[in-house]
Image (cartoon, rainbow, N blue to C red):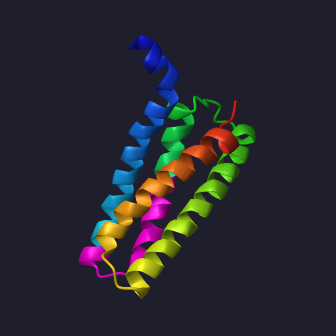
Amino acid sequence: MKKWFEKYKDILAYLVFGVLTTIVNYLVYFPCYNWLGWSAGLSNVLAWVIAVAFAFLTNKPFVFKSYDWSWKTVWPELSKFLGCRIGSGVLETLILFLCVDYLGWNGNVWKLITAVLVIVLNYIGSKFLVFKK
């Protein structure tokens, strides 16, 4: 069991913080969409901004073991991190806009469906482009 944990500890840590980031995202999206009556696209943009800030601050040290907070290290990491997240965020927002705002499908269900795609894309981007060793 210990060998398995050591082998997959980065993925497990990413999953834990990915779930926490998803919770942060949903804590913003669902009230905006369901209670305030905002569009799925607008609700998603606000949720995305807050979740991305949370994700960077947690993924950097706890998932990818990057402890240098000097501007010379943070700036390139943050730039690449935002680039990857903007890509997945735009894709998620487009899917929500098309499926929910345009086609009228259930915004809560589609938010959950897009989360799976976004989590996978964000892990790949963070692992191989942002916090690469």
Rendered position, 87 above or below 101: above
Q: Residue at x 68, y 35 (%)?
A: 132
What's the magenta region?
32-52
* The N terminus, quarter of image: top left
* 7 horizontally vs 102: left or right: right
From where the camera sits, is residue 46 visible? yes
Give percent across and percent down for residue 6: 49, 18
* Residue 99 drawn at (x, y percent): 42, 78
Q: Quadrant of residue 87?
A: bottom right
Residue placed furthest toward the left: 35
Q: Is residue 69 left or right of residue 44?
A: right
Asked if residue 33 is positioned above or below residue 119 in the image, the reply reads below
User: What percent of the width, then of the height, locates residue 80?
Assistant: 69, 50
- Residue furthest to the top in view is 2
Residue for point 63% across, 36% down: 69
Q: Is residue 73 left or right of residue 100?
A: right
Q: Is residue 97 above or below residue 61?
A: below
Count of picture labels? 0
What kind of secondary structure does the magenta stretch mostly adopt? helix
Q: Nearer the viewer, residue 58 or 99?
A: 99
Does residue 51 belong to the magenta stretch?
yes
Magenta-colored stretch includes residue 95: no
- What residue do we see at 63% from left, 50% from top? 81
Residue 22, relative to residue 126: is it above or below?
below
Residue situated in front as seen by the camera: 69 or 18: 18
Q: Residue at x 69, y 44 (%)?
A: 129
| Residue 20 picture quarter | top left
Q: Position of residue 71 (x, y in %)?
A: 71, 42
- Residue 41 in sight from this viewpoint: no
Tell me the quarter of the image containing the C terminus. Answer: top right
